[in-house]
Amino acid sequence: MNLAEADRPAAKGAKTLVAVRHVSKQFANGTIAVRDVNLDLARGEFVSLLGPSGCGKSTLLRMIAGLGDPSVGTIDWATMNHDAWGRPARELGFVFQDPTLMPWATALDNVILPLKLSGTNKGEAEARGAEMLALVGLKGFETSYPRELSGGMKMRVSIARALVTHPKILLMDEPFAALDEITRHKLNDDLLRLWEANQFTAVFVTHSVFESVYLSQRIVVMAARPGRVMADLRVEAPYPRDDLFRTSADYAHWCRIASEKLKEAISA
Amino acid sequence: MTDATLSPAAVPHDGTDAEARPIFREDRKVLGISTEAWPGILAPLGIGILALAAWEFIVWWREIPHFILPGPLLIAKTLVTDWATLSASLWVTLRITAAALIAAVSLGVGLAVLFTQSKWLEKSLFPYAVILQVTPVVSIAPLIIIWVGDINLSLLICAWIVAFFPILSNTILGLNSADHNLRNLFELYGASRWQTLRYLRLPAALPYFLGGLKISGGLALIGAVVAEFVAGSGGSASGLAYRILEAGYQLKIPRMFAALIMISMSGIAIFLTISWISHLLLRRWHESALKREN
Ligand SMILES: Nc1ncnc2c1ncn2[C@@H]1O[C@H](COP(=O)(O)OP(=O)(O)O)[C@@H](O)[C@H]1O
Ligand SMILES: [Mg+2]
């Protein structure tokens, strides 16, 4: 039971999917959101970006997604297929802090949006969408509108939409922060289940130590003003993780270590 | 959750969010109208009947002559006896109103879409739409009638000018009000401009557009009537406004009231129709159309 603090962020042996190199981002108003971030995301790993509010987690995640370019530095993808327009297809799913559903569309229509936009035929899209909804535990809610769903259910729809294209990487920006604790635990469990089954790379932004330890193999601790990476921890606890893990001494131990790192980051 | 199989059954029903039921509910109905809507219909109806009775009584009691104030019964009788003339005129006015509204919708939405595709276009053209809006239609109606020549087309243009702006400005607002994160999402999935318009901006604009349409429906009728007053004083019109002018000259005051009532009723009918369409389109998803229990 030891915490290996990796000098080289990527796990040994695992292939790098995304390489963030010397990335800085300065907004037009002068705010330096992140400064000189280096980060390798390995194929199939579960990484959390942990840090206080305002440390540039969202900015970094959005840049990885291709929403907003870095001011300095590069973000390289190991493989890059190109779409019909010759643009690099990033093969990613994105989950925002809010469910970000189209209120005028049913749960199913929301889930199949990415397929519709890429021109998949309707029949196939709907079949895949329904399958995905069932996978996130919303079988029978295909024709429900977002207004008719609870916060947790909306988030499930949002996750189903992000996964319906079978992306290589799933980026999540504090997806469960607005949910109550019971619902959050449940969604954490379901997320892990989906990750173990589908083998995508997961990048999970959170400001909760407990959530990051429960979910991840690796925690990247960030500090604010300017946003930067302070520590890169490995949580050496086996999967599957469940309620037993949540109450174990092991879990408490990792939480304590991550907390300390976060405290160092905040006071740095 | 030790095995990672992905059947839906793997999500236990444990009293958390998966147990929640839709908060949407169907209303109980009487005669096709929900029970909660009935008081809103019956109350104003009762007030109306009381007021009409008081009116009839005062006219009878003070022996007010017909050419000053006819009672409601006489007006109703006139509506029946003059129905042939009045309904023909009503038809003329309604046709112009409907055509103006259709023109306002197509041009308003069309221009709004163009404007949101090009800021430059919006900046250069929108001020002129404002000028069109703030110019009183009575003041330009005579000019339009002279320039255009054809009376029906002139009236149509006048009614259109009045009805156009609320649809344009509301639709622009709606098209620009699509959720920022949703726009990012469309960008992430490489949506084309057309796809973003079709699947994101137009649906987001729908409630705003319908709000504009509710205002424009009434305005189109007002525009048609006002323009016809202008044209009617020149003796070349056949709609309801012209009937009012004509009845005024001939001191047929009951007929004037009858025509007036037809205009009001048409306005109410237009408003109710648009409200109903709006309700049908928004009832499943928009805040304004959803009823929630607290
Ligand atoms: N679009 C923007 N324009 C200007 N400043 C921004 C913008 N987005 C974020 N910021 C600033 O960048 C910093 C990092 O923000 P963010 O990435 O949202 O942090 P986090 O997600 O960790 O809370 C904050 O100081 C924030 O105010
Ligand atoms: Mg954030």
Image: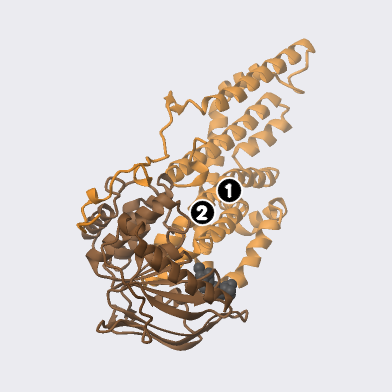
Chain colours: A brown, B orange
Number of the label disc, if any, that sits on residue B105 = 2
**Residue B152 drawn at (x, y percent):** 56, 49
Q: Chain of mark 1?
A: B
Q: What label does residue A148 carry, if any?
A: none
Q: In the rendering, at what x and y percent does residue A169 appear?
A: 32, 72
From the viewer's perspective, is residue B154 above or below residue B274? Answer: below
Q: Nearer the viewer, residue A200 or A86?
A: A200
- Looking at the image, residue B268 sits to the left or right of residue A179; the answer is right
Which quadrant of the rendered structure holds the C terminus of chain A?
A: bottom right
Q: Residue at x 64, y 38 (%)?
A: B241
Residue beneath the point at 71% across and 20% down:
B70
Q: Amino acid at mark 2?
A: Val
Judged from the image, the secondary structure of the residue bearing numbered disc 1 is helix
Residue at point 35%, 41% (across, down): B15
Mark 2 and mark 1 in contact? Answer it, CB < 8 Å. Answer: yes
Residue B39 shown left or right of residue A167 in the figure: right
Q: Is residue A164 at least partly visible in the picture? A: no
Q: Amino acid at mark 1?
A: Ser
User: What is the x, y in percent for residue B62?
Assistant: 80, 13
In the rendered image, which residue does mark 1 sit on? B216
Image quadrant holding the N terminus of chain A, namely bottom left
**The quarter of the picture showing ligand 1:** bottom right
User: Can you say whether A80 is above or below A182 in the image?
Assistant: below
Q: Chain of mark 2?
A: B
Queried on whether the Cβ of the residue with tag 2 lies below 8 angstroms from ligand 1, the answer reads no
